[in-house]
Image (cartoon, helix red, strand yellow):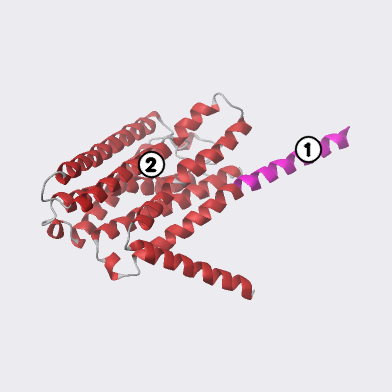
Amino acid sequence: MLRARQSQGNVTVGLVFLERVLFSTLTTAPYCIFFFINVTLLFTLRSKALFRDSSRYVLLFNLVMADTLQMTLSQLLYLLSVWRVLLTYPVCGLLVMFSTLFNEISPLTLVVMSLERYVAVCYPLRHAAIVTIRNTAVAVAVVWFSSLLNVLTRVLLLLDFPFEKLDTLQMSNFCSLFVMFLGSMSDDYDKAYTCFQFVSATVTIASTYVGVRVAARSASADKASAHKARNTLLLHLVQLGLSLLSTMKNAMLVAVSKIVTMNLLLRLLNVFYVFIILLPWCLSCLIYGLRDKSIRPVLLFHLCCCLKVSTKTQVSH
């Protein structure tokens, strides 16, 4: 009887190990593909003076860089949760704060990119004077500073928690933003800030879309440019919606966890992660890298060169 129980226990441990390997592989494979494409796009945007000296491409570089860093941190946190690695509160807090910082960059950058398209269509003669590299650098700095200020506010709210009363700083749950809401003030602030940010971003992008549509009806407007800008702004709204969806992931998982078993919840976590977390953060490359006639040939050239070099290296070994 004892041997039978030990044998059954070994089988269970083996199945759990295989399940974790499977979950890790199913998410790491698409992550590696998305990471490779994003990094190639970042390299492409720095490879030519045309991209480095254009405000539009500087903003795109900032967006893709933030998305790539956020995607990498999310993959790390996901693997830690799959392999049941428990962190200490300080380490988890540091990872979550960086994740929050990068996550705040995307919607704010989309707002700036929308305003740039609005100026390009509605004020074409003043576009070169308004949207300069210097002004773009200032806008990017403001985006990062405001996001950093939000992170510092969250840190101050965390410091209000009585950590000295804990027996140990070792966490009992897996590291995530939701777990780091150690007090009601942190949770309330997160909800209020997220609501304010996305409502403001949605109103701004929707307003620029309406402005572009109105400008497109004027006789002096460049119809082709206005039509392209209108489609770009619609894509901004889609991206913003996907970004909001990824922000709500934890709340959705908490709601689902009340009606399903833990094993089913872990499987749903994989689906949520790939389609709600990874996919939105690779869309910048797919939307802008492949739609833009200036970027597309250079990006495809770099992707093909990297694949050829990788293939030759494997053959030589």
Residue 44 x %, y %: 37, 65
Q: Which contiguous range is marked in magenta?
A: 1-24
Numbered tag placed on residue 124 in the rendering: none
Residue 181 x %, y %: 43, 34
Numbered tag placed on residue 9 in the rendering: 1
> Image check: 268 left or right of 215?
right
What quarter of the picture does the C terminus occupy? Answer: bottom right
Q: Type of residue at label 1?
A: Gly
Q: Are marks 1 and 2 in contact (CB under 8 Å)?
A: no
Counting the numbered discs, the total is 2
Q: What residue is at 46 percent from the left and 46 percent from the top?
A: 279
Question: Tag 2's secondary structure?
Answer: helix
Work out how far the residue at label 1 is from the one at label 2, CA to CA, in angstroms.
42 Å
What is the quadrant of residue 245 in the picture?
top left
Instruction: Quickly name the residue at label 2.
Output: 243
Q: Type of residue at label 2?
A: Ser
Q: What residue is at 43 percent from the left and 61 percent from the top?
A: 39
The numbered mark, 1 or 2, whose residue comes first in the sequence reads: 1
> Image check: 315 left or right of 44?
right
**Farthest bottom residue?**
316
What quarter of the picture does the N terminus occupy? Answer: top right
Can see residue 171? no
Q: What residue is at 28 percent from the left and 35 percent from the top?
A: 199
